[in-house]
Amino acid sequence: MGGWAIAVHGGAGVDPNLPLERQEEAKQLLTRCLNLGISALRSNLSAIDVVELVVRELETDPIFNSGCGSALTEKGTVEMEASIMDGQKRRCGAVSGVTTVKNPISLARLVMDKSPHSYLAFSGAEEFARQQGVEVVDNEYFITKENVGMLKLAKEAKTILFDYRIPVVGLDKCSANVDSPLVMNGLPISVYAPETVGCVVVDGEGRCAAATSTGGLMNKMMGRIGDSPLIGAGTYACELCGVSCTGEGEAIIRGTLAREVAAVMEYKGLGLQEAVDFVIKERLDEGYAGLIAVSKTGEVAYGFNTTGMFRGCATEDGFMEVGIWE
Amino acid sequence: MGWAIALHGGAGDIPLTLPPERRLPREEALQHCLHIGVEALKAGNSALDVVELVVRELENNPHYNAGKGSVLTSEGTVEMEACIMDGKTKKCGAVSGLKTVVNAISLARLVMEKTPHIYLAFDGAEAFAREQGVETVDSDHFITKENIERLKQAKEANRTQLDYTEPTPKALTNEKLMANGDSQLGTVGCVAVDSQGNLATATSTGGLVNKMVGRIGDTPIIGAGTYANHLCAVSATGKGESIIRSTVARDVAALMEFKGLSLKEAAAYAVESVPRGTAGLVAVSATGEVAMPFNTLGMFRASATEDGHPEIAIWPSV
C-alpha cells in the first residue's frame, strides 16, 4: 500500500426522500472538494494543509451545515465550531461559539499554530480572530433562507413530537412518515440538518490529519457545544490514522468515536476498515452517526449506521467514489 | 470488591519545600472531602451523587483551583469549567466559561439531566444556570488574593505554562520556581465506585493561570480529563493541552478493555504517555481498585476503599 488518500463528508443522516436535485448538488460539491484535495496532494501539500483547504471549501459553500449554511440556534443565530488535528505530533486546535469568522476551521488552525492553547471559545475565540486578522463578516452572512425555514419546522416538530394531541399539520410537507418519523437528535429526518462537514487525509509521506466543522444542531440552546470541536469525539488524528465523525453529537461524545477508531487499531491491532466497522457497530449504543477515516498506509474507509452519509473518497492509485446511500 | 473512592486537588510541580501554611489547609481539605465521600458511600449513595458531593466541597474550598480559588485569566477574571460522567449509562454533562455559578459541577450535572445536550458554555451556560435557579454570586466571590498574586507572577515571568521545559528536580530548589511551580496547580476531581459496582467521575477547574479568555482545557472534554464506563472512572489533572491530545482518561479505559491491562497498569501507561511534568490522574475500577499515578513532582490526592487503606498524600509515596 502507501500513497496518499483522502475522504470528505457532508454529514450523516440523510432524508431518504431528499429531492434528486439536492442529491446531485451535494454530490457535485463533494466531487469538487475531492478534486481540490487531490490536486493539493499532487502538489505535495502536507495532510494538515489539505484538510484545512478542503474544509474551507465546504464551509464557504452554503449546501452543507457549516460556515455559510450553518444550522441555527433557538434564537435564529449562528454559532459555529470546528477542530483540526495533525497526526504527526497530535497537535490540535479547536474553536466553538464562533459568530463572525468566515472560516472557523482556519481559526481552529490558528489556535493550534499561533496560540499556547488547544481550544478557544465564544468571545475569547472572536477576540483571537481579530488579533490574527482573519476574515470576519456579519452573523447574517451565514444564515440561509432555507435554514430559517428549517428552524421554524424544528420548533414545530418539537411541539408535535412531545404532544401527540396537536394535529400533525405540516409534517406531510416534510415528507416524513407521520406515524413514526425517522428521528435524529430529536428531530424528524427531514428537518434534522446533517450536522457537519469533515475531511481526513494521509499525504505522500504517510502523515495523517483530520478536520471537522459545523454549525451544530438545528434549534440548539445558546452555548451548546457538540462533538465537532471535541478532540477524540468528532475529530482525531495520530500516527496511525485520521478520523472525522458526524451525526448525533451526544452519541459521538459518549462513544469518543474518533479516538475509538485509533484505539482499536493501536491496542487491538485492527486494520482501518475493521476498526471503522467495529466502532460503528459496537460503540454507538442507540445513537446514529457516521465517520470517515484514512490510515498512514494510504487506505481510506467510512462507515455509518444512519440512512445515508454524504461522502467522497479517493486514493492515489486512481480510486474515486462519491455517494450518499449504502 | 466493594466501594472505593479517590480524589485529587491537582498535579504539578508542588515543591517539597511547600510551606506549612500552604500545605496544611490543603491536606485538611483532602481529609475532609475523603471523609464525606466515604460516609456517603457507606450510606449507600450512588457513585454519581458521591462524586458530585465531593467535588462541590472541593470547589467551595478556596485553596484549590476550582470554584472559589480558581486561577485567573489574563484579564483577571474567572472562567470555570466542569464535567461529570456516569459510568453505568455513559451519560455526561459539561460546562465551560462560568463566571457566577457557585458550583460548576452541579450545573454540569443539570446539563446532563435536564437538557438534550451534553455541553453548554459561556453566556448560554450562565443563562441556563439562571433558568435552573442554581446558586450564583458576584464573580468576585471566586477570586482570592493568592490567585491575584499568581497571575501577577505569571505575567512577570511571561509564561504560559506550555513553555515549560525543565521539569528536573534540580530546578526546583530555586526559590523563584516555588511560586511558579505552585501555579501549575490545576483542577479538582473525584472518582468512585459504589456498592452496586457503578462508576462515576467528576472534574472541576478554574483552568490555567493567565490563560487567554475563552480558553477551554481538558476538564470538560469527555475522554480527555474526564471519563467513566463500566470498567473504570478517571479524572485527570495537569497541562490541559497535553491531556487533550493524549485522550488520557479514555485511554485508561481503552487499555483495560483492549489490552486487558489492570487498572494500575493502564493508569500508569496513560500517564507515562504524556510528557514528564504534565499530568496525573485518579482512577477506580468496578472491582474496587484504586490508582493515582502522576508524572509531576506531586499531586494532592486521597483515596479509600471498603476494606480500608485510606491514603492522603502530596508527593510520591516512597
Image (tube, rainbow, N blue to C red):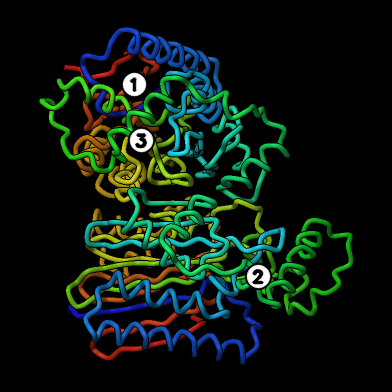
Task: Tell me if label 3 and label 1 are in contact, CB under 8 Å.
Answer: no
Secondary structure under badge 2?
helix
Q: Which amino acid does the dot numbered 1 rest on?
A: Arg
Residue assigned mark 1: B301
> Residue B23's quadrant in the figure?
top left
Task: Relative to B273, say whether A168 is above or below.
Answer: below
Q: Chain of mark 3?
A: B
Q: Earlier in the sequence, mark 3 or mark 1?
A: 3
**x and y percentages locating residue B122 in the rendered image:** 58, 45
Q: Chain of mark 1?
A: B
Report the Cα–Cα distance between label 2 and label 1: 50 Å
- The residue nearer to you, when weighing B234 against B142, is B142
Task: Tell me if label 3 and label 2 are in contact, CB under 8 Å.
Answer: no
Bin the neighbour count of mark 1 within 10 Å (Cα to Cα): few under 14, some 14-19, many 20 and up.
many
Number of numbered tags placed on the structure image: 3
Left or right of B212 on screen, residue A239: left
Q: Chain of mark 2?
A: A
**x and y percentages locating residue B51 in the rendered image:** 49, 27
- The residue nearer to you, when weighing B83 against B266, is B83
Residue assigned mark 2: A140
- Is residue B190 visible in the rendered image? The answer is no
Q: Which amino acid does the dot numbered 3 rest on?
A: Ala
**x and y percentages locating residue B173 in the rendered image:** 15, 20
Q: Which amino acid does the dot numbered 2 rest on?
A: Glu
Residue assigned mark 3: B236
Q: Residue at x 61, y 32 (%)?
A: B100
Task: Relative to A237, say whether B3 is above or below.
Answer: above
